[in-house]
């Protein structure tokens, strides 16, 4: 089947398919879940079981290490925030987003996104949106595990505050993947950026300007109300910057020939 036949087939499918907003609630939910399942399957490339196995092994390792210590030496809430939720989510975000473009190129399916009827931005927004939903669900699951097995922290608040830096990281890696047309290059550049952010985290941890801002670790020399304001300034700033990275990545897809090389 050549490209002309493919376009005609897709046009016929779109013509015979009712619009999404013309469906009832249950039909919309069914379609949304199916789209989410298919997009996550594409992103994971049938390796979800290995990701899940690695995550479970990491959680068990932390649990065993934590309860091997005396009760006064066990992990504090700030350590749980970083090690149990923030670190694995950040690592998964880097790995998955760096392969968004390169996996399409390797499978020779990137051309389809440019020939599919409708906006290609819609395709990539759905793909990236599915990833963001997956990260949020993982954040909620890890926060629930932290609450029931490690230390009492508010589940929803912990999940949200861990998710926001991951959204920024995912947008940044996605932008680099489009910019350099290579998952490996995107991973290396993102790794360097995150390394410097980790390096300067300690000098900046009592300010609002760090990527891994911890709202649960209020310094003794800063008023709680000021820390609360800084928390939301940091979170809103990261969401805006992450959105700008995504916008720049989508704009970078206008150069079709460059991406397909």
Image (tube, grey):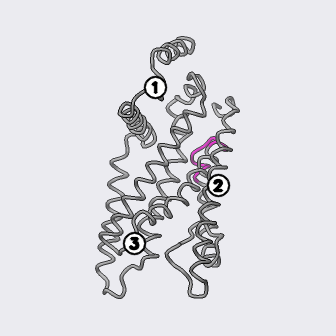
- The residues tagged by marks 2 and 1 sit, at their Cα atoms, a distance apart of 32 Å
- Mark 3 or 1, closer to the camera: 1
Contact, mark 2 vs mark 3 (Cβ under 8 Å): no
- The residues tagged by marks 2 and 3 sit, at their Cα atoms, a distance apart of 26 Å
Other residues around mark 2 within 10 Å, as few (<14) / some (14–19) / many (≥20): few
Q: Residue at x 56, y 37 (%)?
A: 124
Question: Which residues are drawn in magenta?
Answer: 178-187
Query: Does the magenta-highlighted stretch encompass residue 171?
Result: no
Q: Tag on residue 240?
A: 2
Q: Residue at x 64, y 72 (%)?
A: 208
Residue 253 position by quadrant: top right
Residue position for label 1:
22
Camera-nearest residue between 261 and 63: 63
Q: Mark 2 vs mark 1: which is more N-terminal?
A: 1
Q: Residue at x 50, y 53 (%)?
A: 93
Query: Of helix, strand and loop, which one carries label 1?
Result: helix
The relative height of residue 49 versus residue 254 in the rendered view (above or below) is below
Q: Position of residue 249 (x, y in %)?
A: 65, 43
Q: Position of residue 10 (x, y in %)?
A: 50, 17
Residue 42 position by quadrant: top left
- Mark 2 or 1, closer to the camera: 1
The relative height of residue 192 versus residue 205 in the rendered view (above or below) is above
Query: Of helix, strand and loop, which one carries label 3?
Result: loop
Other residues around mark 1 within 10 Å, as few (<14) / some (14–19) / many (≥20): few
Residue position for label 3:
153
């Amino acid at each position: 089947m050549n490209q002309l036949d493919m376009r005609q087939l897709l046009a016929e499918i779109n013509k015979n398919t009712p619009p999404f907003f013309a469906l009832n609630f249950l039909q919309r939910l069914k379609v949304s879940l199916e789209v989410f399942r298919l997009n996550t399957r594409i992103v994971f490339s049938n390796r979800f079981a290995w990701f899940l196995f690695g995550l479970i092994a990491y959680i068990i390792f932390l649990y065993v290490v934590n309860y091997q210590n005396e009760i006064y030496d066990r992990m504090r809430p700030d350590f749980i925030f970083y090690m149990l939720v923030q670190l694995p989510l950040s690592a998964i975000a880097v790995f998955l987003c760096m392969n968004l473009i390169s996996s399409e190129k390797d499978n020779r399916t990137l051309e389809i996104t440019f020939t599919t009827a409708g906006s290609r931005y819609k395709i990539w927004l759905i793909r990236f949106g599915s990833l963001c939903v997956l990260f949020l669900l993982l954040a909620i699951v890890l926060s629930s595990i932290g609450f029931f097995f490690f230390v009492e922290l508010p589940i929803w608040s912990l999940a949200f505050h861990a998710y926001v830096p991951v959204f920024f990281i995912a947008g940044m890696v996605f932008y680099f993947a489009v910019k350099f047309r290579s998952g490996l290059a995107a991973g290396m550049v993102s790794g360097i950026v995150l390394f410097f952010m980790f390096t300067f985290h300690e000098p900046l941890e009592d300010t609002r300007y760090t990527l891994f801002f911890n709202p649960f670790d209020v310094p003794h020399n800063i008023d709680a109300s000021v820390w609360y304001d800084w928390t939301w300034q940091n979170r809103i700033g990261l969401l805006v910057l992450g959105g700008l990275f995504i916008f720049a990545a989508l704009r970078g897809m206008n150069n079709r020939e460059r991406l397909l090389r």
